[in-house]
Amino acid sequence: MIRDEPEAREWYIECDPGSVQQRIFERLGFVRVPVCYHQPPLDGDVAVRTAGLGPELVLMRKGFAEESGSWKFSLRRFRPVLRQILSEVYRISDPQQSASFRTAVGELS
Protein backbone atom coordinates (compact mmCIF):
# COMPACT_ATOMS: atom_id res chain seq x y z
CA MET A 1 0.00 0.00 0.00
CA ILE A 2 2.73 2.46 0.88
CA ARG A 3 4.39 1.76 -2.45
CA ASP A 4 1.14 2.73 -4.23
CA GLU A 5 0.45 5.70 -1.95
CA PRO A 6 3.58 6.93 -0.12
CA GLU A 7 1.53 9.28 2.10
CA ALA A 8 -0.73 6.48 3.37
CA ARG A 9 -0.58 6.10 7.15
CA GLU A 10 -3.55 3.91 7.99
CA TRP A 11 -5.78 1.14 6.70
CA TYR A 12 -9.56 0.86 7.01
CA ILE A 13 -11.66 -2.27 6.58
CA GLU A 14 -15.36 -3.12 6.86
CA CYS A 15 -16.79 -6.31 8.31
CA ASP A 16 -20.01 -7.69 9.72
CA PRO A 17 -20.58 -6.91 13.42
CA GLY A 18 -19.57 -9.78 15.69
CA SER A 19 -18.16 -11.81 12.81
CA VAL A 20 -15.18 -14.12 12.76
CA GLN A 21 -13.52 -11.58 10.47
CA GLN A 22 -13.96 -8.82 13.05
CA ARG A 23 -12.30 -10.96 15.73
CA ILE A 24 -9.42 -11.85 13.38
CA PHE A 25 -8.78 -8.21 12.50
CA GLU A 26 -8.96 -7.23 16.18
CA ARG A 27 -6.24 -9.80 16.91
CA LEU A 28 -4.21 -8.23 14.10
CA GLY A 29 -4.38 -4.82 15.80
CA PHE A 30 -7.35 -3.20 14.07
CA VAL A 31 -9.63 -1.11 16.28
CA ARG A 32 -13.26 -0.24 15.77
CA VAL A 33 -13.96 3.30 14.61
CA PRO A 34 -16.61 4.59 17.06
CA VAL A 35 -19.29 5.58 14.52
CA CYS A 36 -22.56 4.12 13.28
CA TYR A 37 -21.31 3.00 9.87
CA HIS A 38 -23.57 1.81 7.08
CA GLN A 39 -22.18 0.61 3.80
CA PRO A 40 -23.79 2.53 0.94
CA PRO A 41 -26.19 0.44 -1.14
CA LEU A 42 -24.28 -1.38 -3.86
CA ASP A 43 -26.86 -0.55 -6.53
CA GLY A 44 -25.22 0.92 -9.63
CA ASP A 45 -27.33 4.07 -9.41
CA VAL A 46 -25.40 6.90 -7.71
CA ALA A 47 -28.66 8.47 -6.50
CA VAL A 48 -29.51 5.25 -4.63
CA ARG A 49 -26.02 5.03 -3.11
CA THR A 50 -26.34 8.64 -1.94
CA ALA A 51 -29.89 8.49 -0.60
CA GLY A 52 -30.07 5.09 1.01
CA LEU A 53 -28.35 3.12 3.72
CA GLY A 54 -26.99 -0.34 3.17
CA PRO A 55 -26.23 -2.82 5.93
CA GLU A 56 -24.66 -1.67 9.18
CA LEU A 57 -21.04 -2.78 9.29
CA VAL A 58 -18.11 -2.36 11.63
CA LEU A 59 -15.52 0.05 10.28
CA MET A 60 -12.07 -0.78 11.63
CA ARG A 61 -8.74 1.02 11.42
CA LYS A 62 -5.08 0.19 11.83
CA GLY A 63 -2.11 2.51 11.47
CA PHE A 64 0.87 1.33 9.44
CA ALA A 65 3.37 2.44 12.06
CA GLU A 66 3.53 0.97 15.54
CA GLU A 67 1.07 3.01 17.55
CA SER A 68 0.83 0.78 20.60
CA GLY A 69 -2.62 2.01 21.55
CA SER A 70 -1.86 5.68 21.03
CA TRP A 71 -4.51 6.32 18.33
CA LYS A 72 -7.31 8.58 19.48
CA PHE A 73 -10.45 9.01 17.40
CA SER A 74 -11.10 12.54 16.17
CA LEU A 75 -14.24 13.37 14.21
CA ARG A 76 -12.39 16.28 12.59
CA ARG A 77 -9.70 13.92 11.25
CA PHE A 78 -12.19 11.19 10.40
CA ARG A 79 -14.45 13.27 8.14
CA PRO A 80 -11.95 13.49 5.24
CA VAL A 81 -11.16 9.78 5.62
CA LEU A 82 -14.82 8.85 5.31
CA ARG A 83 -15.24 11.21 2.34
CA GLN A 84 -12.31 9.48 0.65
CA ILE A 85 -13.67 5.98 1.34
CA LEU A 86 -17.10 6.86 -0.02
CA SER A 87 -15.65 8.66 -3.02
CA GLU A 88 -12.95 6.19 -4.04
CA VAL A 89 -14.44 2.87 -2.99
CA TYR A 90 -18.12 3.52 -3.66
CA ARG A 91 -17.74 6.19 -6.40
CA ILE A 92 -20.07 8.65 -4.70
CA SER A 93 -19.35 12.04 -6.26
CA ASP A 94 -20.54 14.09 -3.26
CA PRO A 95 -19.93 11.85 -0.24
CA GLN A 96 -21.03 14.44 2.33
CA GLN A 97 -24.56 14.28 0.92
CA SER A 98 -24.74 10.50 1.28
CA ALA A 99 -26.84 8.93 4.00
CA SER A 100 -23.82 6.83 5.02
CA PHE A 101 -21.69 9.93 5.66
CA ARG A 102 -24.44 11.87 7.43
CA THR A 103 -25.29 8.89 9.66
CA ALA A 104 -21.68 8.27 10.66
CA VAL A 105 -20.69 11.86 11.44
CA GLY A 106 -24.11 13.08 12.55
CA GLU A 107 -24.09 10.65 15.43
CA LEU A 108 -21.03 12.32 16.92
CA SER A 109 -21.27 15.95 15.81
Image (cartoon, grey):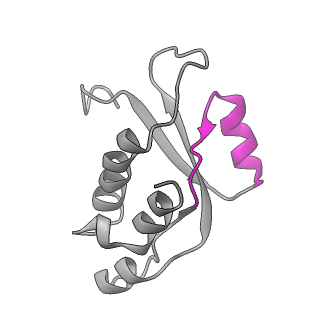
Query: Residue at the spot x=47%, y=63% of the render?
Result: 106
Query: Residue at the spot x=49%, y=60% of the render?
Result: 104
Q: Is residue 80 above or below residue 97?
A: above
Q: Is residue 57 above or below residue 59?
A: below
Question: What's drawn in magenta, residue-wise?
Answer: 18-36
Q: Magenta stretch: residue 5 in it?
A: no
Is residue 49 toward the left or the right of residue 68 in the image?
Answer: left
Query: Residue at the spot x=35%, y=60% of the render?
Result: 86
Instruction: Please provide percent x and percent y for residue 49.
Output: 38, 78
Please state, as top left, top right, bottom left or bottom right, where the N terminus lies in the image: top left
- In front of the other: 31 or 90: 31
What is the tally of numbered marks visible in this picture?
Answer: 0
Instruction: Please provide percent x and percent y for residue 41.
Output: 46, 77
Q: Is residue 91 visible?
A: no
Q: Is residue 109 visible?
A: yes
Query: Residue at the spot x=60%, y=72% of the render?
Result: 55
Q: Is residue 22 above or below residue 73?
A: below
- In front of the other: 94 or 77: 77
Q: Is residue 9 above or below residue 90?
A: above
